[in-house]
Image: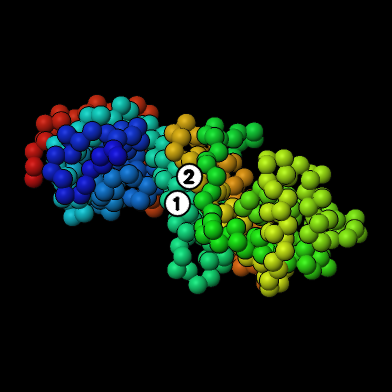
Amino acid sequence: MPHSPEPDEDDLDAIPAPHPVFHVEQALLGALLFDPRRLGDVTGISADSFSTAAHAALFTAINALPPPDPVEHTKNTKWLNQVLAAGREQARGLTASYLHTLIQVCPWPRHAPAYARMVEAEHARRRLRAAAEHLVQTVHDASLPHPVQTVLAEADALAAVVDDIASRFPPRAGVLPRTPASPPATVPDYAEAVEEEQLLLATATAHPADIDSVRWLIPEDFTQPLHAGLWQCLTTLMRRHEPVDPVTVLWEAQQRGLLHDGREPGDVLCLLAEPAGSVEHWSQRALKRSLLAAADRSARRIAAYTDDPTNTPFQLVAGARRGLADIGAIRTRWQHATGRPLPQRPQATPTTRAGPSIRRAPAASQPPARPAAVRAAVGRTP
């Protein structure tokens, strides 16, 4: 894993930059240290937007301190020393020499708004990945008393992050992520799923009249291709108003090619011959597993999109919304299955991109030359 600066590390200058955004953050902070008036041009980010504790501490200090007089700032490092002292309260490893490095590596202070936009974009990527990973963890948390409700709440939280990113980076038409879909989701309690699906099929075969009450269950909800095919056989026979029993289901299965892989007819008959419980109960269990698997699959796909650095925020939003739509579709069927009202999805809070409230004097169109006093004195530790 790439190494990131820690708050208590002493030599920040010697730490390699793990990602391009590290250089962008350095350029932005250098612009603000060199010309604090540029802070008025920076919008859409906060201390949390930075990838390291040291950079976050510096940005906090720059925002908290009153801006210096522009003329005085070119003559001495008083304000820079104040920023350093304030930053060290949160990141002890900050040094005067690192501030000097930040100023030196900034190509153009007047490009600060562009640098801030890049920092905001990378922060959006990290936020989206964190929300997707948290959804995956929730899906596999066996301690949850109400897993479906909790998973749907986490899916809503992920959707809120996507909405916020979309408000900051409106999606462009026709732009989709380039990352391939992630591997299939992991189905919790695989052996239990197989057993319960067999019980569902056997019970539905014994009580075919109950199949009509679970129209919300579809073949894609099953974990086994054979089970999905047999459910199609059952629903097809019912739709045709034909007799339903293990033998008629077996015959329909043969017509659909479900026995072509060497599966013995007797095994299918045995599978359909041991009913227990109710069709509705086992169907809800199957749908619950399907919902959790869909949430896991969608979250993993979204996380995979964030792993590809070539995907822009526009593309991340487009891909994430497709994944969330898959969850939404099965969520609607869950409501029909349980008869429970869906929890209201929280409304996205309008995002403001206004900058700091402190008024700044208009910056010059061209960056002033770095004053000799700053170049010489910023390296001295106060």
| Image point (62%, 45%), residue name | 322
SS class, disc 1: helix
**Corner quadrant of residue 123:** top left
**Nearer to the camera, 284 or 179:** 284
Q: Is residue 289 left or right of residue 15?
A: right
| Vertical comparison of 19 with 249: above or below | above
Q: Amino acid at mark 2?
A: Ala
Question: Visible in this render: residue 86?
Answer: no
Looking at the image, is mark 2 or mark 1 earlier in the sequence?
A: 1
Indicate the quadrant containing the C terminus: top left, top right, bottom left or bottom right: top left
Query: Residue tagged by mark 1?
Result: 133
| Image point (53%, 70%), residue name | 146
The percent position of residue 168, horizontal first and vertical second, equals 52, 45
Q: Are marks 2 and 1 in contact (CB under 8 Å)?
A: yes
Q: Is residue 114 left or right of residue 241?
A: left
| Image point (50%, 39%), residue name | 305
**Nearer to the camera, 262 or 130:** 262
Q: Residues within 10 Å of mark 1 (few under 14, many from 20)?
A: some
| Image point (67%, 64%), residue name | 199
The percent position of residue 120, horizontal first and vertical second, equals 42, 42
Q: Is residue 24 left or right of residue 54?
A: right
Query: Residue tagged by mark 2?
Result: 303
The percent position of residue 363, horizontal first and vertical second, equals 35, 35
| Vertical comparison of 56 with 247: above or below | above
Q: Amino acid at mark 1?
A: Glu
